[in-house]
Amino acid sequence: MTPQSEDFSAWYNELVVKAQLVDRGPVRGTMVIRPYGYRVWELLQADLDRRIKEAGHDNAVFPVFIPESYLKREAEHVEGFSPELAVVTIAGGKELEEPLVVRPTSETVIGEYMAKWIESHRDLPLLLNQWANVVRWEMRPRMFLRTTEFLWQEGHTAHIDEEDAMRETMWALETYAAVARELAAMPVVAGEKTPGERFAGAVRTFTIEAMMRDGRALQAGTSHYLGTNFAKAFEIQYQDEEGRLQLAHTTSWGMSTRMIGGVIMTHGDDKGLVLPPRLAPYQVVIVPIGRKEQGERAAAEARRLGAAIKAMGIRVHVDDNRPQLSPGYKFNEWEMRGVPVRIELGMRDLENGVATVVRRLPTVEGQGKEQIPLEKVPELLPGVLADFQAFLLARAEAFRDEHTADVDSWDDFTAQVAGGWANAFHCGRGECEDEIKADTAATPRVIPQQAPEETGVCVKCGRPSAYGKRILFGKAY
């Protein structure tokens, strides 16, 4: 593959295909998610779905076709999405009386039904979630990161007041940050978007931002407090305890298959994928070595070992049905496909009663490969995988911190965002944000929750800072 240092974009585009994660769809900008890639999504989906349900949300499914008039009810919303919309005007061989929009997001259609289902304060909060595909017409598509059609979950909730809705908004943000760290080993920065970066129709937008290995940012999940904007547009009202009609406060929040792209670009190297064990389709692959009788004996032992490892709750694959391929080819293939741990099992290993255990990356200098007694392998592997998961998170965190710096001058700012993130003061004006983007291609990624309170002057125009702290700027996907 093309080395990352030579052309990171080419490396990524080659890897997603070679690792059998995805193939290009028949329509420009669409993708076919192959079984290996879809399994990564399923693992993330299952964990996130569990968290959503444990917090009291119910899953539902809404139509993929939305009347165009629904989107027009919230002016800022339709204006924000208008360039990305796919619209159906003919169906059944006839021109439709009203065009239908293919779902870009579901605030409007879900708002319509919230208005039908909510009558009293006793109906609140209404906590819904949908696992779905959405369509946003992309001019510059890239597999997983920006495709015309992608998969996601979208939470939509209605509440009595701002306080309760904001509690929900922050719960979603914290949940996304936990999923990113705990499953994807992505050390995200959580916080609020600037007004110029808000979701169309939102009062406040919150985000988790992750740094990729080329120094760019990836918006990995967002949570929006919508205030009463959509409630006004769709008449989402409830009777309070005194019998008065009140507008509900709504939220929406989503995480998508772009997380797979984030995993690839956070951990991958010139040899290919590096998958965190908790999201790896195969956490362990066993490759038996040998020909004819010796090969059959090694394969039989590999299957026995695989069964013992599986009994420990580990996702394991025994690569014993491709005799035409050399062990070296298989080693390289599974390394490229990012398997956290490979076990090599040949006659010499069997004679010595050991298995050769190879980590995808050495967690300690010089400790990428070791021999472990066969009978101890199943019981030791959970610890090996847990250590590897923790190692990837720490490695990504160190990389992010090494490529993030506080800057106060424009020259330092432009140099820093060329390959990383800049912590800088900003005046908060949209015109200034636009000038920074035009000059450097960098945008304000997040007003970090954890940043200390500070005051200073805008790195671009010299006006007083608007946020009481430094905000993160960077180039982004």
Image (cartoon, rainbow, N blue to C red):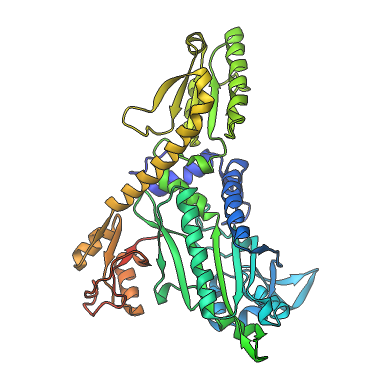
Quarter of the figure with the N terminus:
top left
> Is residue 73 left or right of 343 when viewed as pictured?
right
Q: Position of residue 252 (x, y in %)?
A: 56, 70
Quadrant where the C terminus sits is: bottom left
On screen, residue 384 above or below 198: above
Q: Nearer the viewer, residue 439 or 93?
A: 439
Q: Residue at x 53, y 43 (%)?
A: 279
**Residue 429 visible within the image:** yes
Question: Residue shown at 54%/12% (left/top)?
Answer: 290
- From the viewer's perspective, tell me whether residue 294 is left or right of residue 208: right
Residue 387, image x, y percentages: 42, 37
Give the x, y percent position of residue 448: 36, 65
Position above or below: 247 against 223 = below
Q: In this image, 458 relative to 93: left or right?
A: left
Please tell me how many numbered marks the rendered image carries: 0
Residue 406 percent across, percent down from the top left: 23, 62
Query: Which residue appears at 56% of the width and 57% of the height?
Result: 29
Question: Which residue occupies the foreground of this view, 456 or 450?
Answer: 450
Instruction: Name the residue located 38 percent from the left edge and 47 percent from the top edge.
Output: 8
- Kindly give the residue lying farthest to the front in the view shown: 241
- The image quarter in which residue 100 lies: bottom right
Name above or below for residue 112 compared with residue 243. Answer: above
Q: Is residue 410 above or below residue 75?
A: above
